[in-house]
Amino acid sequence: MSSRRSSSEAAWSFWVQGALLLLARPRLWAVGLRQVRRLARPRWWRTPPFLPVPDRDYVRFRLETQYGTDGRPDPQDLVEYLEWCAEMEATRPARRRR
């Protein structure tokens, strides 16, 4: 049970530290919100926790492929991911409205 608790604490620590890093980078706020929308579970408002969060299995898979089974995510990687997303959005041709 203690390893599960420490894992949970590590997850909270990652998100809190990541949020603090993002607060200092307002240019990434809109990118972050777009990513939240893109990664949210379909019909997230119908099932608990009623938040636009990605599917737990998807997050587990992505973290394991990047950090391994025992690795701990680095909050700076969240910032780098959003910077990469911003670069990709900037290189994408603008969509025309019909």
Image (cartoon, helix red, strand yellow):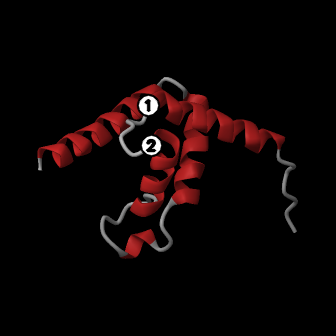
| Three-letter code, disc 1 | Asp
The quadrant where residue 53 appears: bottom left
Asked whether the residues under the numbered discs 1 and 2 touch, taking CB atoms below 8 Å apart as contact, a structural biologist would say no
Position in image of residue 75 (x %, y %): 44, 31
Q: Residue at x 18, y 44 (%)?
A: 3
- The C terminus sits in image quarter: bottom right
The quadrant where residue 8 appears: top left
Can residue 55 be seen here? The reply is no
Q: CA distance from mark 1 to mark 2?
A: 13 Å
Q: Which label number is shown at residue 83?
A: none
Q: Residue furthest front?
A: 69
Position in image of residue 64 (x %, y %): 45, 48
Mark 2 Cα shell of 10 Å, populated few (<14), some (14-19), many (≥20) = few
Position in image of residue 51 (x %, y %): 38, 61
Mark 1 Cα shell of 10 Å, populated few (<14), some (14-19), many (≥20) = some
Q: Is residue 48 above or below residue 27?
A: below
| Three-letter code, disc 2 | Gly
Question: In the image, which is nearer the foreground, mark 1 or mark 2?
Answer: 2
- The secondary element bearing badge 1 is classed as loop
In the rendered image, which residue does mark 1 sit on?
A: 74
Position in image of residue 26 (x %, y %): 55, 29
Q: Is residue 13 above or below residue 98?
A: above
Q: Residue at x 64, y 33 (%)?
A: 83
Q: Residue furthest top?
A: 24
Q: Which label number is shown at residue 68?
A: 2
Q: Residue at x 50, y 61 (%)?
A: 40
